[in-house]
Structure formats: C-alpha cells, structure tokens
Amino acid sequence: MTDTSSGGTGGESGVNKPLYLCSPFADAALVSGNFKTIVTLPKYTDIMEWVAVNIFDFYTNLNEFYGAITECCTQSSCPTMSAGPNLNYMWTTPERKQISLSAPTYIDSVMSSVQNLLDDESVFPTKSGQEFNPQTFPVTIKHIYRQFLRIFAHIYHAHFETILHLRAEPHFNSLFAHFLAFGREYQLLEERDIKGEAGAPVGVGLLWERWKESGKLEH
C-alpha cells in the first residue's frame, strides 16, 4: 500500500455549517459516556494482537458503511477525495508521484490494499507460533489508520446526508468515536492527521473537538 498526503483545494464554499456538526446529529450515538473504557488493553492481552483485532473490526465496519453509500459516491459526484472545503487527499504512486484520484477509486485502492495486508501472514499472523514484527507492524498500522481516517473524513464531508437518510448516524458516529479513541490511546493518529493544516482543515477535526469537550473522548 502506498503512502498518501493531503493537499489541493476544494471547490466548495464553507458558508453553511455541515450537518454532522449540528445538533442532534453530531451527538447521536449508540452508547453514552467516555470511549476510553472500550479501548483499554484487556488484562493478559498482547498489545499487537489487540491492535490487529481492532484493525480488522474497523476495516469490516467501515467497509460495510461504505458499501451502504457507494451508489452516492461515484466518479462524477466525487471526482476528488475531498474531506473539507479546502482539502483533497492525494494518492502517492509506487514511483512517489502524487496524483488526484476520484473518491471511489481512492477508497477502493485503500480497501483492496488493506485486505491484502490482512491476508498476509507475515503482517497479520494467525497461526500458532507466529509473531508480529515489532519493527514493521507499528509502521504498517499507522499507515492503515491514517487511510481509514481519510475515508471517514470523506464520508462525513460528502455523504453524511445519506447516512442520515439511512438513520445510521448513531452507528456511524459511535464507530468513528471508537476509532478516534483507539487511535489516540495507542498513538496511531497524530493530532495533525485529525485536524489538518491551517489552510486545509479536515472537516471532522471539529467533530473531534466537540466530542472531547462533551467528555465522549479524552483530551
């Protein structure tokens, strides 16, 4: 899986507040309280195994949500991987060239590459006696996590109305809050990944701030 970096400018104006930042949608959730309790490492559990299990769960759930909105995420409706009024994510080719991809192409590329990694026994060992590589596993996981964040960010930015029509906002918000809490607990996400740059902020960065203020996420 190749790296990506953010950049570019979107063609949308940020005049109206996004629906995902408005009440009651922003606060809809399946559970109440702080998500710290469900991301804490269980007793006697290997940390890399715990991270791997959660990565698989995030992949599965995010893939299901994307499948539910995929008819709305097309080459024409989403010609770029947008995640804010002034932010499009770029894809980096194996030759280290940054290119702009449509959102469905970008997301399909991420999900395919992550599936290949999950199936790779040298990265995600499942057989007795095999161990995770302590040098490469953390790097791989951080990269996967950053890509998942970008998919979440695009869905919130471009397709949250569809999530509302499906009445799935409590489920999607809970999944994203869990994802953020887990990422911060195990240092898989940097604050700049969530918030973006000053001139190209990530839209969901404000949602993260809101959930921290409400006590849903740790400061």
Image (cartoon, rainbow, N blue to C red):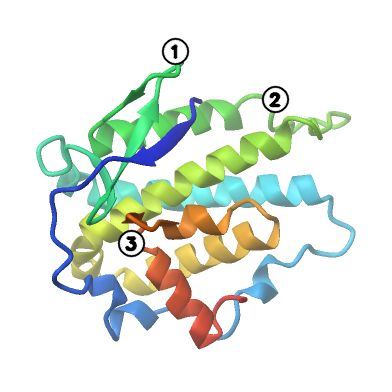
Mark 2: which secondary structure? loop
Tag shown at residue 130: none
Q: Earlier in the sequence, mark 3 or mark 1?
A: 1
**Residue visible at 34% across and 78% down in the picture:** 26
**Residue visible at 59% across and 32% down in the picture:** 118
In the image, what residue type sits under mark 2? Glu
194 or 183, which is in the foreground? 194
Q: Position of residue 164 (x, y in %)?
A: 23, 70
Q: Position of residue 204 (x, y in %)?
A: 38, 63
**Residue at the spot of label 3:** 203
Q: Quadrant of residue 89?
A: top left
Tag shown at residue 95: 1
In the image, what residue type sits under mark 3? Gly
Q: Is residue 30 visible?
A: no
Q: Quadrant of residue 138?
A: top right
Q: Earlier in the sequence, mark 2 or mark 1?
A: 1
133 or 16, which is in the foreground? 16
**Residue visible at 45% across and 51% down in the picture:** 149
- Residue 94 position (above or below residue 124): above
Quadrant housing the C terminus: bottom right
Marks 2 and 1, how far apart in space? 26 Å
**Residue at the spot of label 2:** 121
Q: Position of residue 60 (x, y in %)?
A: 48, 47
Mark 3: which secondary structure? loop
